[in-house]
Amino acid sequence: MAFGWIDEQAAARRRAGLVRTLRPRPADSPLLDLASNDYLGLARHPEVVEGAAAAARTWGGGATGSRLVTGTTELHTELERELADFCGFEAALVFSSGYAANLAAVTALAPHGSLIVSDAGNHASLIDGCRLARGTTQVVAHADPAAVRKALGTHDGPAIAVSDTVFSVDGDAAPLAGLAEACREHGAGLVVDDAHGLGVLGAGGRGAPQAAGLAGADDVVVTVTLSKSLGSQGGAVLGPARVVAHLVNAARTFIFDTGLAPASAGAALAALRLLGREPERAARAREVATGLHARLTAAGLEAVRPDAAVISVRAPSPEEAVQWAADCRAAGLFVGCFRPPSVPDGISRLRLTARADLSEEQIERAVRVIGETRP
């Protein structure tokens, strides 16, 4: 029977307690949200919502075509200029998603004969970029510049090192300065995904590369998403103008994909301008994360110290992690639940995200619920 193997895989997932299900949320959910990536609380901000609405009224519901045909509006180029300027890079290129931006950056910058050195903890989008690239990929130990240096030393041709800046599972930050030094010793480029750093790290939320002194470097390329701190949708690649021009001509997820919807571009631009006026939002997100971690560990829970806005709380097993998250929801708290195979180390955990708009009362409530429902 066609697709009969699907039933076998579904049964195996059920036996392992790894079945995923969709849970549509209402617009007015009563749950306290510590699961989304809306780090700055901007997704529903009136200015951001109006930015989306105004863009839709002006440009329509869709981009109408690929960026190289009709899908580039004046709004897209305005967003690219301001995003590059905010983060300290020469140029930016906007994509329909952060996933597409990562596929573009890795595949277009790793041609045949090149080496990609990839961190073992990288996001799935970077891993898929490595799989699709024509270069050879070598996976190295997590957050280890010495391992990157050793891998680069085995190759004489073009090379890049690829890493998240803040890893999405435990919220730990990559040693960007050490990675850049290792790359420069071998004439390699550094490509980093700042999805969880933009809006949280750096001066006024300008990102982890800016905090590490790498913004604007001619050997550094940064990808970002517009769907986390900026509360919108889409992604972008930031870097030297010649790299961006190369992506326009060589990145398949740019050339063959419909452009980002104008409403998303308008929302992201409004959020970026708001962050520029209110840089304290970034510091508040970090403060909330630190506070959550301190309270969780004081309650006897095993939580990983956050370097940005993601806090990981270890669970005994996949089944208990799922039940823990369900019990939190029943008590009015929405938390993330990460299990194998989504986590490279095989350890199940609750994943909490700090938001700049959380009150002290909400933080205390969240810690209380997590502690009372622990397995």
Image (cartoon, rainbow, N blue to C red):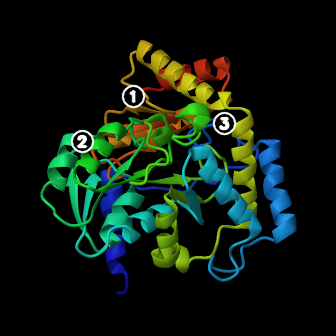
**Which badge, 1 or 3, comes first in the chain's sequence?**
3
User: Where residue 70 sits in the image (x, y, percent)?
Assistant: 70, 80
The reply to whether callout 1 and callout 3 are in contact (CB within 8 Å) is no
Closer mark to the observer between disc 2 and disc 1: 2
Assign a secondary structure to mark 3.
loop
Residue extending farthest to the bottom is 1
Where is residue 50 drawn, in percent x and y?
Answer: 84, 51
Depth order, front residue of 65/85: 85
The single residue placed furthest to the left in the displayed view is 154
For marks 2 and 1 on the same chain, the one whose residue lies earlier in the sequence: 2
Return the residue at label 1.
375
Spot occupied by residue 366 in the image (x, y as percentages of width and height): 57, 25
| Label 3 sits on residue | 31
Q: Which residue is mark 2?
A: 145
Q: Mark on residue 327?
A: none
Between the C-alphas of marks 2 and 3, the distance is 41 Å
Above or below: residue 90 compared with residue 288 = below
Q: Position of residue 201 (x, y in %)?
A: 52, 34
Which of the two residues, 24 or 290, is positioned nearer the viewer here? 290
Query: Image point 29% across, 38% down: which residue?
Result: 178
The residue at the point 36 percent across, 33 percent down is 315
Tell whether 105 sits left or right of 203: left
